[in-house]
Amino acid sequence: MCRDIILATIEEQRNKLITVGLMYGLSSPIAVQQSQELDRLLNSYDQLQKSNERETELKKP
């Protein structure tokens, strides 16, 4: 996934989590599931960032 797509998906997932949390409470099973999905996306974004940083370092003379 490219950076922009991940960031857009993270924002969508945050909004879903907020909505579900307001409707059912943050400890509800559906909110926990939404939170776990958001965590997965954030981890993917973090891995992508670290990978890009490594590539940048390798390209330096």
Image (cartoon, helix red, strand yellow):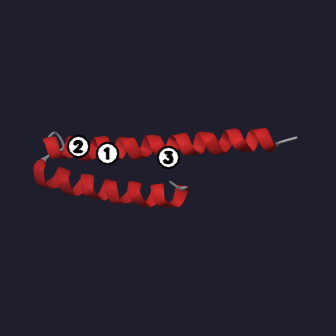
Badge 1 amino acid: Glu
Label 3 CA crowd tier, 10 Å (few <14, some 14–19, many 20+): many
Rendered residue at 75%/39% (across/down): 57
Badge 2 amino acid: Gln
- Chain-order first, disc 1 or disc 3: 1
Q: Quadrant of residue 2?
A: bottom right
Please identify the quadrant where the C terminus is shown: top right
Whole-percent x and y of residue 60?
83, 42
Q: In this view, does 59 lie above or below 2?
A: above
Q: Distance between the residues labelled 2 and 1?
A: 6 Å
Element class at badge 3: helix
Element class at badge 2: helix
Label 1 CA crowd tier, 10 Å (few <14, some 14–19, many 20+): some
2 and 1 marks in contact (CB < 8 Å): yes
Whole-percent x and y of residue 30?
16, 46
Q: In this view, does 21 lie above or below 39?
A: below
Q: In which quarter of the image is residue 12?
A: bottom left
Badge 3 amino acid: Tyr
Which of these two is toward me, 6 or 14? Answer: 6
Left or right side of 39 for 50: right
Left or right side of 45 for 61: right
Name the outermost residue toward the front: 1
Rendered residue at 19%/50% (across/down): 21
Residue highlighted by disc 1: 37
Rendered residue at 38%/42% (across/down): 40
Whole-percent x and y of residue 41?
41, 46
Which of these two is toward me, 9 or 24? Answer: 9
Q: Residue 7 carries which label?
A: none
Whole-percent x and y of residue 1?
50, 54
Residue highlighted by disc 3: 45
Label 2 CA crowd tier, 10 Å (few <14, some 14–19, many 20+): few
Q: Residue 33 carries which label?
A: 2
